[in-house]
Image (cartoon, rainbow, N blue to C red):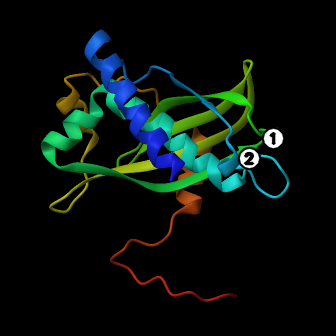
Amino acid sequence: MNVWWRTLLTMLHAKVLLRRNGPISPRTVGRVRVRTLPTDIDLLMHMNNGRYASLFDLGRFDLLVRTGIWDAMNARQWYAVVASETITFRKSLQLWQRFTIESRLYGHDDKAVYLVHRAVVGGEVYAEMIVRARFLQRGGGIVRNEELFSALGRPDDLPPLPAWISAWAEGSALPSTKAPAPSSWD
């Protein structure tokens, strides 16, 4: 339940920053300061690997609100879903340790937007997650990147994706929801 409260507080803080400073560029690195709580810890007394994704959501919500994407999404009845993600761990976060979630839009392809989230302590990366997210319409269908950037009133100035990100997205993709996807183990 504490992630709900953290999310609410993060979004309220982001709304205040948006009103005070205006929207930030989609290329801006967002930063959210947090602390590892007892509910984030596993039996080995460091942050549970599953909790990173939940806490990295805070960085994603911060970016969505502060770039203006959140308001554009709500006005047009769009929503975002994570299509795939991968995380790499370098060092463990300990109980009560303060860290910063750094988040940035990384680029896009024709169907998805890519984000990078990092857990950073004293300028040092402890973990990094790449997220492939899709913007969808409540009535059905994908929100095209042209629509997204047009709704923001900004040019699409995100850099091209590195080849390894495109290869990862292709290699980790599951069949379309309209195609069969039987669970068979070879």
- Give the quadrant of residue 185: bottom right
In the picture as drawn, the residue positioned furthest to the right comes out as 44
Q: Amino acid at mark 1?
A: Ser
Q: Which residue, given by chain and number where applicable, does mark 1 sit on? A: 92
Q: Residue at x 45, y 38 (%)?
A: 60
Between the residue at mark 2 and the residue at mark 1, the CA separation in whole angstroms equals: 7 Å
Q: Quadrant of the C terminus?
A: bottom right
Front residue (pair 65, 146):
65
In the picture as drawn, the residue positioned furthest to the top comes out as 21
Rendered location of residue 144, percent (x, y): 25, 45
Q: Residue at x 28, y 36 (%)?
A: 70
Front residue (pair 173, 81):
81
Rendered location of residue 83, percent (x, y): 45, 57
Q: Residue at x 66, y 50 (%)?
A: 39
The answer to whether residue 64 of the structure is visible from this angle is yes
Q: Secondary structure at mark 1?
A: loop
Find out whether the residues at labels 2 and 1 contact each other: C-beta distance under 8 Å.
yes
Q: Amino acid at mark 2?
A: Met
Q: Secondary structure at mark 2?
A: loop
Numbered mark located on residue 116 in the image: none
Q: Which residue, given by chain and number where applicable, does mark 2 sit on? A: 47
Rendered location of residue 95, percent (x, y): 77, 40
Q: Residues within 10 Å of mark 2 (few under 14, many from 20)?
A: many
Please, is residue 89 above or below residue 31 in the view?
A: below
Judge left or right: residue 156 versus residue 174: left
Rendered location of residue 109, percent (x, y): 41, 44
Judge left or right: residue 76 versus residue 73: left
Please, is residue 29 above or below residue 61 in the view?
A: above
